[in-house]
Amino acid sequence: MLSLDLTGKTALIGGSTQGIGLASAQALASLGAHCILISRNEDKLKEAVKTLDTNAGQQHGYLVADYTQPESNETIILCV
């Protein structure tokens, strides 16, 4: 595992309900980052957020976004 301290930093992770996206979110959270997971399936996002480390006091969140509609996603990301 990396020895970085990401406490106080925020990471946006796309495609984060499975595979490499979820693994990336879990690794970033274990380093102290506050993670915002992005995917189109809200139920899977809710479950994925539960798997993230919160030992540094992080409050992780998620955004529901569909990459096939980029114009609506720009609005979502700008609001973060």
Image (cartoon, helix red, strand yellow):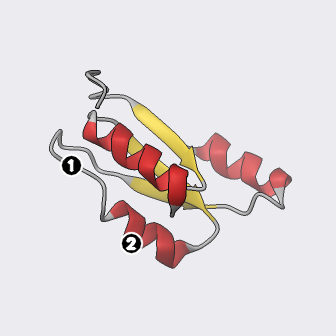
Residue annotated with mark 2: 47
Toward the front, the furthest residue is 1
| Displayed quadrant of residue 38 | bottom right
Mark 1, secondary structure of its residue: loop
| Displayed quadrant of residue 46 | bottom left
Q: Is residue 9 left or right of residue 11?
A: left
Of 10 and 72, the residue lying toward us: 10
Q: Is residue 3 left or right of residue 46?
A: left
Mark 2, secondary structure of its residue: helix
Q: Is residue 19 left or right of residue 66?
A: left
Q: Indicate the amino acid at tag 1.
A: Thr
Compared with 30, 19 (above or below) is below
Residue annotated with mark 1: 54
Compared with 55, 8 (above or below) is above
Residue at 59% across / 73% down in the picture? 41
Of 3 and 57, the residue lying toward us: 3
Q: Earlier in the sequence, mark 2 or mark 1?
A: 2
Coordinates of residue 5 in the picture (x, y in percent): 26, 23
Q: How many marks?
A: 2
Q: Is residue 68 left or right of residue 9?
A: right
Please report contact status of discs 2 and 1: CB closer than 8 Å, yes or no: no
Coordinates of residue 31 in the picture (x, y in percent): 28, 33
Residue at 40% across / 65% down in the picture? 48
Compared with 7, 55 (above or below) is below
Quadrant into which the N terminus falls: top left
- Circle 2 packing at 10 Å, graded few (<14), some (14-19), many (20+), is few
Q: Label 2 to label 1, Cα distance in Å?
A: 15 Å
Residue at 35% across / 52% down in the picture? 60
Coordinates of residue 62 in the picture (x, y in percent): 48, 58
- Circle 1 packing at 10 Å, graded few (<14), some (14-19), many (20+), is some
Q: Indicate the amino acid at tag 2.
A: Glu
Residue at 37% across / 29% down in the picture? 9
